[in-house]
Amino acid sequence: MTLQFNAVIEPGEKYLVAFCPEFPEANGQGRTREEALQDLAASIQSVLDFRLAESLAHASPQAERTVVQVAA
């Protein structure tokens, strides 16, 4: 499944800087637009993985885990 998020790319001091409004803690940078977006995508994935692990750590052993799809 592919998820899509907004990306904002701005020139930084040395590199292009990218951020995602939906995930303020996720940022990327690169010499090119593609590098900045790839770095941002990796950062978003790290945030999602961390949030999932943290949430599941607090779930009860009896909790059901399933998947829900959201349409754009």
Image: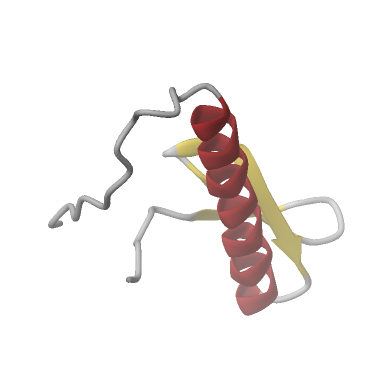
Tell me which colouring the rendered structure shows.
secondary structure
Q: Compared to 2, does 43 lie above or below?
A: above
Q: Residue furthest left?
A: 71
Residue at the (50%, 33%) spot, across then down: 56
Q: Nearer the viewer, residue 63 or 34?
A: 63
Give the number of marks: 0
Q: Is residue 43 left or right of residue 51?
A: right
Q: Is residue 53 left or right of residue 1?
A: right
Q: Is residue 23 left or right of residue 29?
A: left
Q: Residue furthest front?
A: 62
Q: Nearer the viewer, residue 33 or 22?
A: 22
Q: Compared to 50, does 67 lie above or below?
A: below
Residue at the (33%, 43%) spot, across then down: 65
Residue at the (50%, 29%) spot, across then down: 55
Q: Compared to 23, does 62 lie above or below?
A: above
Q: Is residue 21 left or right of residue 19?
A: left
Q: Quadrant of residue 59?
A: top left
Q: Position of residue 72 (x, y in %)?
A: 15, 56
Q: Position of residue 33 (x, y in %)?
A: 62, 73
The quadrant the N terminus occupies is: bottom left
Residue at the (19%, 55%) spot, across then down: 69
Q: Position of residue 23 (x, y in %)?
A: 50, 38
